[in-house]
């Protein structure tokens, strides 16, 4: 049975992708120099990732957690210092086709499609992930017919929530990953920092980094 919980915004987020069983079937060995691809923005296409894009409710203009949905960068925010324990909202944008396995025989294969993943910097282990290759349907009003008509769009930024309840204080990254039969390809990364909690690591949690000085030696 999949447990569900409510995130900071009141939205319901699934913990399915946070389970050890899910992570165990992910192919992480192919992460390497050949597949780790970072590119300059606006060379062939652009990918952008924003952390906690609707935190400031004043700047969100009354739209709350929807402030960055189908919006340009002016409507979004970026707050790379976060607190763990609640679902972290992430905004993403690509000005080209997002690789998708929807509608194919690999639709339910976790090693196929486009995902946002949480990692320690430079480490292969997937700490949390969410699929982003679904197509969003929006309705518009056909003035001639006087009815609402559906159309498909990927314009502007879209948002998803990533589980952070297993993270302790330290540095992390969100990776934009295209998972294929030949292995995952990392096309973009965005760093963020978890400022709290400084925790005794719970079962299944991620150990915080070891400080260079003992607490008694720190100023």
Image: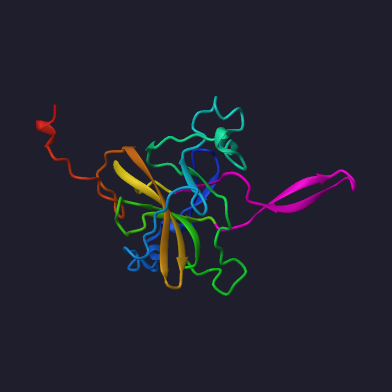
Give the farthest residue toward the left: 217
80 versus 185 height, above or below? above
Q: Residue furthest top?
A: 58
Name the side, left or right, on which 67 lies relative to 144.
Answer: left
Quarter that holds the C terminus:
top left
> At 17% across and 40% down in the image, what residue appears?
211
Foreground pick, 76 / 106:
76
- Is 163 left or right of 101, judged from the image as shown? left
What scheme was used to colour the molecule?
A: rainbow
Q: Give the answer, above or below, for where 178 lies relative to 71.
A: below
The answer to whether residue 168 shows anywhere in this view is: no
Magenta stretch encompasses residue 161: yes
- Image coords of residue 83 (percent x, y): 37, 37
Q: Position of residue 206 (x, y in %)?
A: 29, 51
Magenta stretch contains residue 141: yes
Q: How many marks?
A: 0
| Residue drawn where x is 36% and y is 54% of the image | 127
> Residue at coordinates 14% horizontally, 34% vertically from top-left?
215
Q: Residue furthest front?
A: 43
Residue 116, position as x, y percentages in the image: 46, 54
Q: Is residue 145 left or right of residue 83?
A: right
Secondary structure predominantly adopted by residues drawn in magenta: strand
206 left or right of 158?
left
Residue sitting at x 38%, y 68% = 27
Task: Give the x, y percent position of residue 42.
Answer: 50, 48
The span picked out in magenta is 133-162
């Amino acid at each position: 049975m999949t447990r569900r919980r409510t995130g900071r915004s009141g939205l319901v987020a699934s913990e399915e992708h946070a389970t050890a069983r899910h992570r165990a079937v992910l192919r992480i060995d192919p992460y390497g120099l050949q597949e780790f691809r970072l590119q300059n923005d606006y060379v062939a296409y652009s990918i952008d990732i924003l952390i906690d894009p609707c935190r400031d409710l004043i700047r969100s203009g009354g739209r709350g957690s929807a402030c960055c949905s189908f919006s340009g960068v002016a409507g979004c925010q970026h707050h790379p210092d976060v607190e763990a324990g609640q679902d972290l909202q992430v905004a993403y944008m690509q000005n080209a086709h997002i690789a998708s396995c929807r509608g194919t025989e690999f639709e339910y294969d976790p090693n196929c499609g486009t995902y946002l993943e949480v990692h320690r910097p430079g480490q292969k282990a997937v700490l949390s992930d969410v699929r982003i290759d679904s197509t969003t349907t929006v309705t518009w009003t056909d003035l001639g017919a006087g009815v609402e008509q559906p159309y498909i769009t990927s314009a502007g930024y879209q948002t998803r929530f990533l589980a952070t309840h297993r993270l302790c204080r330290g540095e992390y990254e969100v990776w934009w990953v295209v998972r294929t039969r030949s292995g995952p390809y990392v096309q973009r990364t965005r760093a963020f920092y978890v400022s709290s909690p400084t925790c005794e690591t719970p079962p299944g949690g991620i150990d915080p980094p070891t400080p260079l000085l003992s607490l008694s030696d720190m100023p």
